[in-house]
Structures are given as C-alpha cells and as structure tokens.
Image (spheres, helix red, strand yellow):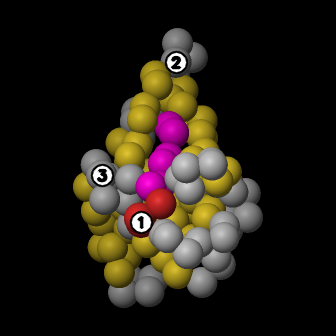
Amino acid sequence: MSLKKQFLKNDMCKVTFRIPPEAAPQAKEVTVVGEFNNWDQSSEPMRRLKSGEFTTTVKMDSGREYQFRYLVDGMEWINDWEADRYEYSSFGNCENSVVSV
C-alpha cells in the first residue's frame, strides 16, 4: 500500500491511495473512507487497474491529519501499511490509519 502526496499552491494536497493486489487479492471493489469524506462509504470508490491494484486520488486541506481506512467489498476494513501513523478508535475497537498533509 502507499500514499503519494502532492502539495498544491492553494493550501490543498492531492493524496493518491494505492492498494497492491496482494493486500486484497479477492476484492471486487474497494473504497477509501475517512474524515476527509465524512466516513461516507460510497464517496471515494477506488479504480481497479489491469495489474489488480486499486487506486484513487483525493483532494484534502493541507495542515491537517485525517483518519481513514479501506473498505473491501463492503464488508472488511483494512488499514494502510504505510500510513503516517495509527490512531485508536473506540468505534469498532480498532486502529485507524492516519495521513498527515
């Protein structure tokens, strides 16, 4: 998994989220869900590439941290292996990935 950040001149940052095939080998669909989209499970669907990798790019306000997770096939939550850090969440008794922009 990876997070690629591109800082823009207007205090925004484009973050590209990537999930390699081995992270979700049987996945039919993956969405990235987090504070940047109000935890909306349908607002950031990832595109599946021919390589089997899933990817999407999201614009975010710079100077903040955002918690997020990936939702695989609407059933399984996974974290990003290369997140900037992890934050405990009492909702679901788990850790969320965090991206700092």
Specify the farthest residue to the front. Answer: 50
Q: Dividing the picture into quarters, in which one does residue 81 lie?
A: bottom left
Mark whose residue sits in front, 2 or 1: 1
Q: Please indicate whether residue 48 sits to the left or right of residue 89 in the image.
A: right
Q: Eyeballing the image, is 23 above or below 98?
A: below
Secondary element at image label 3: loop
Secondary element at image label 2: loop
Where residue 63 is drawn, which disc sits there? none
Secondary element at image label 1: helix
Distance from the alpha carbon under mark 3 to that under mark 2: 22 Å
Q: Residue at x 55, y 49 (%)?
A: 51
- Name the kind of residue labelled 3 in the image: Glu
Q: Which residue is mark 2?
A: 8
Of callouts 2 and 1, the N-terminal one: 2
Q: Residue at x 73, y 64 (%)?
A: 42
- Name the kind of residue labelled 1 in the image: Ala
Q: Residue at x 35, y 81 (%)?
A: 94
Q: Which residue is mark 1?
A: 23
Q: Which residue is mark 3?
A: 82
Instruction: Depth check: give the residue in front, 36 or 48.
Output: 48
Distance from the alpha carbon under mark 3 to that under mark 1: 12 Å
Can residue 26 be seen by looking at this rendering? yes
Q: Eyeballing the image, is 27 above or below 81?
A: below
Can residue 38 be seen by looking at this rendering? no
Name the spot of residue 17 as percent of width and height, x first.
Answer: 50, 46
Instruction: Depth check: give the residue in front, 68 or 25.
Output: 25
Magenta segment boundaries in residue numbering: 15-20
- Name the kind of residue labelled 2 in the image: Leu
